[in-house]
Image (cartoon, helix red, strand yellow):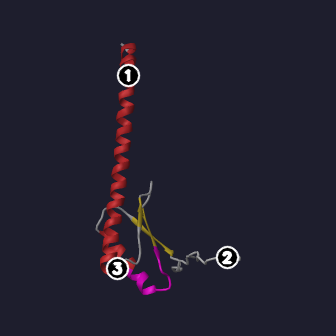
Amino acid sequence: MLSTLTLVLQMLSPLIVVILLLEAARWRDRRRDAAISRQIALTDALAEELGAVVAPVVRPAWWGPWRVHIAVPVSHPVLVGRVVAIAAAVLARVPGRHAIVLTPREPATPVVTRVPSIVPRPQAA
């Protein structure tokens, strides 16, 4: 009886492993889709209210709250406060805990490109 049970478990083990791997992939896809949908909702709410001033990034954590990373212009404290208020309002509507992580955004530096000038060379006589 015990040897029959062992034989059946050995025969079913590849199927069990495949099922477990498929479930793990499904769990990963659900978490990724949830992160993307939260990020889209947050980005849309911020863009609707303030325009395209910040770009939040939502990442699920293994344990603990989801992380919402937002690079904000620290030279505009009123804007930072408004971004946090909008983010908190949007994230209060979705299930789970969230941690808003603010990082200072560097001021935009103008991109200087050098265009090579074409100057005709003087011809030797």
Q: CA distance from mark 1 to mark 2?
A: 89 Å
| Contact? badges 3 and 2 (CB < 8 Å) | no
Q: From what the image shows, is residue 68 above or below residue 109?
A: above
Q: Residue furthest right?
A: 125
Q: Nearer the viewer's eye, disc 3 or disc 2? A: 2
- Counting labels gives 3
Q: Position of residue 22 (x, y in %)?
A: 35, 39
- Name the one closer to the observer, 97 or 51: 51
Residue positioned 33% across, 57% down in the render = 34
Locate residue 83, reporting x and y percent. 39, 78
In the shown orientation, is residue 92 left or right of residue 63?
left
C-alpha span from label 1 to label 3? 59 Å
Asked whether disc 1 touches disc 2, contact meaning CB atoms under 8 Å apart, the reply is: no
- Amino acid at pointer 1: Leu
Label 1 crowd bin: few (<14), some (14–19), many (20+), radius 10 Å: few
Give residue 88's position: percent from left, percent from top.
35, 73
- Mark 1 or mark 2: name the one nearer the start of the chain: 1
Q: Which residue is mark 3?
A: 51
Q: What residue does disc 2 label? A: 123
- SS at circle 3: loop
Q: Secondary structure at mark 1?
A: helix
- Image quadrant for the C terminus? bottom right
Separation (CA) of disc 3 from disc 2: 57 Å
Q: Quadrant of residue 95?
A: bottom left
Residue corresponding to mark 1? 9
Viewer-closest of 9 and 77: 77
Residue 77 is covered by the magenta coloring: yes
Within 10 Å of disc 2 (Cα), the crowding (few <14, some 14-19, many 20+) is few
> Label 3 amino acid?
Gly
Q: Are marks 1 and 3 in contact (CB under 8 Å)?
A: no
User: Looking at the picture, does residue 96 appear above or below residue 54?
Assistant: above
Mark 2: which amino acid? Gln
